[in-house]
Image (cartoon, rainbow, N blue to C red):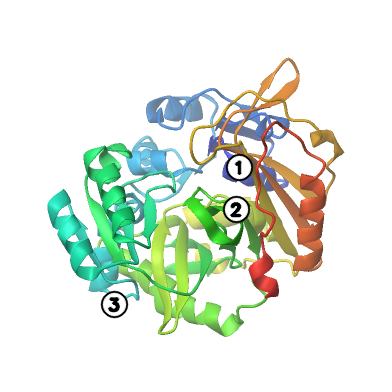
Amino acid sequence: MKVLVVGGGGREHAIVWKLSQSPKINKLYCAPGNPGIAELAECVSIAVSEIEKLADFAKKEQIDLTFVGPEEPLSLGIVNFFKEQELTIFGPSKEAALIEGSKAFAKELMMKYQIPTAKYAAFTNYEEALAYVRSEGPPIVIKADGLAAGKGVVVAKKFEEAEEALKSMMKEVTFGSAGARVVVEEFLEGEELTLLSFVNGATVKPMVPAQDHKPVFNNDKGPNTGGMGTYAPLPHIESSMIDRIIQEIVEPTAKAMVEEGYPFEGILYTGLILTKEGPKVIEYNARFGDPETQVILPLLETDLLDILIASSEGELEKIEVNWTEKSAVCVIMTSGGYPGPYKKGDVIKGLEQIEYPTIVFHAGTSEKDSEILTNGGRVLGITAIGDNLREARDMAYKSVGKIYFSNAHFRTDIASKAFY
């Protein structure tokens, strides 16, 4: 088979890495890809938003299946367009991708179907939003309604921080049209986790749970990022809690989308918080999470292609999805200054020293004169697979110590919550 993966970050590198192990694939393409992906697939310089060009390429090369990595093309309707052209593609329709593309849509869905989540209100008027924040009081959460690359969320501990966030989103238009409407939520306390699932209509095949680390500094301090590291599975969270999340949240969400006439086909990401009242939804994504993918896919035993084919043929319920008993830890190395302004173009050294069971996933890199350079905020994801979490964590940090680029930053406490 010929397979095309759309995207060019760490998540797509992990997807390509996993698909490259399938004996059924004889040609793998990635658009636009990156230098790490180029070692496993042929990279094609088409941007993720150039849907017509991607479809033309899929037709010309007779691609058997296209897998969409990032949220932007999903929200632009790449799945609808490919299906109209009779091209096989894995991912949710434009309508179903609204579960990520609009926080307000997701909130309304949860309220209607009694899926547990934080109390909220949505606003398009700055003064009204500010008045609501004043009446509710901090701590409070401010979210840009639309897509903001994982950065449009502010947890305000003081009123001034909430005011600043609203001003930034609604008046200074920091996140463009994504912040034209904001969702203001009650602050929930508890441990966070992510449960990703393969979903087709009402059929749900959950993956191993993972835990992301969003704030840029140790002990969850500093501004939110797209993710500073992650680990899976979660030995300190009981399997009965995961079963409860599947039964009370994920399966009802899939059924709700069917009821609404937007059946979801693809990867449903459910971001959760374990409160005193039980698990509640923080957010949904309509695709694999980044960096969670970098620890989840290395633990998948079933051929990923088989799952994608079964789903696209409407037979997801017939496939058995198996997972290894091992653990994986991913530490993200970022450019100094991220998530604020950062420099690009620094030479990365030491990559050749890393050997399996550690994998280096490229997130923001470029290549010039046979050298790999930094080309993004999140530069590399260093993932190690071990017999247990402690072994995986030690291995990941040992590998991080072998890699160097100017002003590299990483957290040193990834996965430590599992050991408290």
Q: Amino acid at mark 1?
A: Gly
Check disc 3 and report its element: helix, strand or loop: loop
Check disc 1 and report its element: helix, strand or loop: helix
Q: Is residue 241 left or right of residue 102?
A: right
From the image, tell me which residue sits under label 3: 114
113 in relation to 304, above or below: below
Q: Which quarter of the image is occupied by the N terminus? A: top right
State the count of labels. Answer: 3
Distance, label 3 to label 1, CA atoms, is: 35 Å
Give percent across and percent down for residue 386: 80, 62
Disc on the earlier residue, 2 or 3? 3
Q: Which quarter of the image is occupied by the C terminus? A: bottom right
Q: Is residue 46 left or right of residue 153?
A: right
Q: Amino acid at mark 3?
A: Gln
Q: Amino acid at mark 2?
A: Thr
Please give the name of the residue rendered at 78% of the width and 66% of the height, measured from the top-left corner: 390
Q: Is residue 94 left or right of residue 412?
A: left
Distance, label 2 to label 3, CA atoms, is: 29 Å
Mark 2–mark 1 CB contact (< 8 Å) = yes
Packing grade of label 2 (10 A; few <14, some 14-19, many >=20) is many
From the image, tell me which residue sits under label 1: 10
Disc on the earlier residue, 2 or 1? 1
Kindly indicate the quadrant of the structure image that contains residue 116. bottom left
Kindly indicate the quadrant of the structure image that contains residue 169. top left
The answer to whether residue 110 is seen in the rendering is: yes
From the image, tell me which residue sits under label 2: 293
